[in-house]
Every structure is written in C-alpha cells, then in structure tokens.
Image: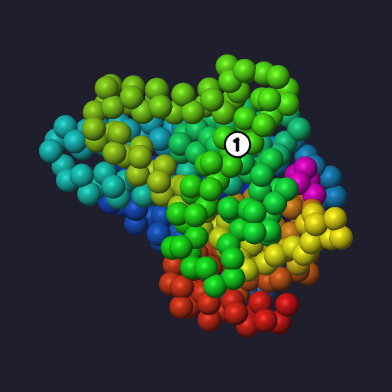
Amino acid sequence: MHLRDLRFALAWTLPLAVGVAAWRSPWAAWGVVFAFQGGLALVEAIAPHWTSPPAESASRSWFGWCLRLHVLWQGALLALGVAIAARWTGEGGSPWAIVALGIGIGGVTGSQGITFAHELGHSRSRVDRTLGWVLMSSVLYAHFMVEHYRGHHARAATPDDPASARRGESLWRFLPRTLAGSFASAWRLEAQQRALLRRGWLRSPLAWATMAQLVGLAALAITFGAGALLFWLVQAAYAAFLLEAINYIEHYGLERGAGADGRPEPFATQHAWNADHALTNCFIANLPRHSDHHMHAWKPYAMLEALPGPQLPAGYAGCLFLASVPRLWFRAMEPRLAAL
C-alpha cells in the first residue's frame, strides 16, 4: 500500500468530529457539519487547481475497507444520536436542538453514507451490495438501490431520468420531481424484474428493506420516544436532500442525443459535470470524477480518472452553496452550457 492511499481514510474524520460535537451539544453537531462544508468550499475556491493524484492502476483491498468500515462509524453515530435525542427529550429540551442534531448527523449519513453505499452497490461482491442496502435503509432511501443501478445509469442525461436536472430548472423545482419520480421508478423497475424472473414480492430485497425501514421507525418510537423518532426522520431527510442536490449538480442541463433507432446515444464524457479537487475526493471517494464513473460503472472509485469533460465552476461543496441560490447557480452554469 502506498502512503498516498491513506488519503481516503481522511473521510473518517467527519463522523468522528460530528460524534464528538454531538456528545457535547446537539447544536454543535450542526455547527461542525456546516463548518466542514464551508471549509471545503473555501479550500476549493482558494486552491482550485489542487487536484487528486492520477487514477490507481489496480484496485487494492484497502480501498474497499475504507468504505466497509464506514458502516461501523455510521452505526455508532446513529446510535449516539438516538441516545442523545432520547435524553434531551426526557430532560425537556427544545425539539429544535434535536432537529439540529439530525441535520448534523444527516450531513454525515448523506454526504458520506450515501456516497459509500452507492460505491458498495456497484461492487461485484454480494456482501458489499448488502452493506449498501444497510446504509441506504438507515436513511430511509432503500429504493435508491434499485432506481440508481437499473434506472439512473440507463437513463442519465435524458428527459426520462428523474435524477437528471433540466436546463433552467432550479434545485427547488427539481427536488419534488426527483423525489417522487425516483421512488415511483424504483417500484416500477422492481415489479418488472419480479415479473421477468417470475418471483413474488417475498423475494424482493426492496420490499424487505422497505418493511425493515417501517418496522425500525415504529420500534424506535416505542423504545426511545418521539425525540428519537424526530432525530431519525430529520437525519434521513437531510441525507436525502444532499443526495438529490448532488444529483442535480452532476447532470444539470446535459442531455444525450438520440440515435437513429430512437435510443439515447452512449454515455460519454460530455454527459456529466466533473470536478477534481483533491480534498473533496478524499471525503467522498472520487465521486466528482463522474463521467468516468458512468462510462465504467464497475470501476472501483480509486481507479476513476479525471476526464476532460464539462467542468463545474467549483467543487461539490461550493456548488452545493451555489445551487441553493438559483440566481447564482444559473449565472455560473449558463456560460458553461452555452460553450458546450
């Protein structure tokens, strides 16, 4: 293992920092997450040409364990959040503090938990894919494990994809469309596969994961009370927001043309927005090297290349702030779209 491979372990500092902050105060967890996001955006702006090392020529077991161990960190962080929320409620604390705690921990489960679940879901290992289901179920978004792989990867950058934002569509108009569309598409795709394989719903991982989510929420409320339930719902909601906000950024305004047979042209470098900031790539497993990911979906994250496709005006952290203010987002992106 090369010393530079350890850079991906830097991702572990976020759940650790948020956990320590949450232990001190629910409000501190919220503050740490936004400090991380703001700090990353600032570093991206100050050092825009600080790029990651070249893609690895071969995958190593270390890269997989960086992701798998996050399941433990996230489980511990969620358990801590439940305990703090239950105690805070029992002491008569403000529910707004529990909301802040949920946003803080949701910043980890959304930015890293979902990103790592996404990567594990692309693995050829059944164990890794199961861990992906676990992580996505913990944020009440298990349907992603169907829609992303069978839906989004086939339809990305086309009008049929609920996770691809259209030109001129703001983040806030995109969110309800993608949330409803992705959920409906996942169940439709699962039903089609069940019919094709002639299997009942009792053999559907989506059905079982959805049931586990509902039973888990009921057990949480009964065992730990309304405060713990509020915390879990808030962290899941903020995690889902981060996922769909990143989806918005990754394909905004880009569209694949249709071939003579009416089917979309093959996915190419010009069909996803890319960024290659070293620090951000350490925290979210090279996800901003997005064109290569779509072109080679089974390629491990450490082997993804920085392709010369459309480039974002900032890294993901900076673009998240830009996208939240549509006027700023359109001002940054329209010249880039026009140039393409």
Res 3 seen here: no
Q: Is residue 282 positioned above or below 65 on the image?
A: below
Q: Residue at x 26, y 44 (%)?
A: 98
Return the x and y of residue 17 as percentages of the image width and height. Answer: 43, 48
Q: Closest to the observer: 247 or 63?
A: 247
Residue 156 on image: x %, y %:
68, 54
Quadrant for the N terminus in the image: top right
Q: In which quarter of the image is residue 277?
A: bottom right
Q: In this image, 337 relative to 107: left or right?
A: right
Give the vertical position of 238 relative to 87 (above or below). below
Tell me, yes or no, if residue 93 can be seen here.
Answer: yes
- The C terminus lies in quadrant: bottom right
Colour style of the rendered protein structure: rainbow
| Residue lying at 65% horizontally and 79% vertically, measured from the top left | 336
Q: Is mark 1 on a helix, strand or loop?
A: helix
Residue 219 is situated, as x and y percent measured from the top left of the image, at 34, 22
Q: Which sits in the foreground, 231 or 161?
A: 161
* Most common secondary structure along the magenta stretch: loop
Point out the stretch of residues depicted in magenta: 296-300
Q: What is the residue that sits farthest to the left in this orientation?
A: 92
**320 is higher (above) or lower (below) than 200:** below
Please identify the quarter of the rendering in which residue 339 is found: bottom right
The number of numbered discs placed on residues in the rendered structure image is 1
As shown in the figure, which amino acid type bears the numbered disc 1? Answer: Arg
Kindly identify the residue that appears in the image at 42 percent across and 42 percent down.
Answer: 236
Q: Is residue 189 left or right of residue 19?
A: right
Q: Which residue is drawn at 67% across and 67% down?
A: 254
Residue 136: x and y in percent read: 53, 36
Question: Callout 1: 10 Å neighbours few (<14), some, many (20+)?
Answer: some
Q: Mark 1 points at which residue?
A: 188
Left or right of 149? Residue 299 is right
